[in-house]
Image (spheres, rainbow, N blue to C red):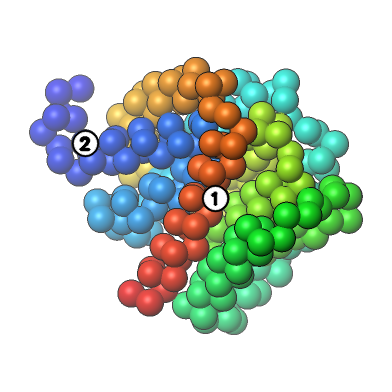
Amino acid sequence: MLEIFSDTSLLLAIGIAFISTLIQSLTGFGFAIVSTPLLLMVYDAKEVVVLLQFLSVVLDTVFVFFVKDNIDWHFLKPLLIGSVIGHPIGILIYLFVPTIGLKIFIACVILSFLFLTKIYRKQLTETSCKTGVVGCLSGILNTSTSMSGPPLIIYLTSTNRDKTSLRATCIAYFTIINYLGILAFYLAGKDFSFAIEQSIYIVPFCFIALWLGNKLFPYISQKMFNRLVFVMLLFSALYTIYSAIN
């Protein structure tokens, strides 16, 4: 255990994962959005992708038990059906569309939508059809860019869903999506040894952040929650443009 304190990279990874987990436990998303750009300064990009997928599966599986009573399972059904339809489309986009152009386009769409939500206050009404379309978009983005979150978050906040249901439902959805991601890596023959080795040290600190965020969540108002979600989506869009250009 003492070797943690002599490994600067591991210490940085633990700190990054702790903060990212705390944010995710408060909002229901954001773990990858926050940790990806920071971990890329510590580890190889390909290893970061697998490490985050592995960490997300472990953390979200535990997190689901904290929020299971508030999950909207009826909402998840059309969302997941749409996601399954979207995944192969995303793979085709990944294979044939330039990644840089795709990322910039997606980031611009997110920024435009965030701007519109500020000037257009009318709420959307949730329907199975709309939810299926959002799930399809999320599935497409998951396999083409690994950014499955923004369509779902934007949709749920636009329907004015309360923070408790939004957080719980997002966690349940991302848990399932992450398992599919791990399965895809396994079928592709990816080696998980690095991810498992690093996770042994990182996960305990993430569990502390998960517990802390769950305790703090009741004290966050709906207004503060919506602002935090807006900032996270804005950060996601701006970072996506930055990473594409660089």
Q: Is residue 131 above or below residue 92?
A: above
Question: In the rendered image, is residue 132 in sight?
Answer: no
What residue is at 38 percent from the left and 47 percent from the top?
35
Between 245 and 64, the residue placed more toward the observer is: 245
Element class at badge 1: helix
Please state which amino acid type lies under the numbered disc 1. Phe
Between 218 and 196, the residue placed more toward the observer is: 218
Question: In the rendered image, is residue 241 in sight?
Answer: yes
Please state which amino acid type lies under the numbered disc 2. Leu
Residue 230's disc is 1
Residue 11's disc is 2
Q: Residues within 10 Å of mark 2 (few under 14, many from 20)?
A: some
Task: Point out residue 58 in the picture as x, y percentages from the top left corner.
Answer: 50, 32
Q: Is residue 81 left or right of residue 20?
A: right
Q: In this view, does 48 lie to the left or right of 82?
A: left
The N terminus lies in quadrant: top left
Element class at badge 2: helix
Q: Is residue 77 left or right of residue 193?
A: right
What residue is at 18 percent from the left and 30 percent from the top?
4
Is disc 2 in contact with disc 1, using a CB cutoff of under 8 Å?
Answer: no
What residue is at 36 percent from the left and 33 percent from the top?
18
Task: Point out residue 49 in the picture as x, y percentages from the top left corner.
Answer: 43, 53
What residue is at 46 percent from the left and 36 percent from the top?
23
Circle 2 or circle 1, nearest the eye:
1
User: Which image quadrant is residue 129 in?
Assistant: bottom right
Between 16 and 118, the residue placed more toward the observer is: 118
Could you give the CA–CA distance between mark 2 and mark 1, rounded to whole angstroms?
29 Å
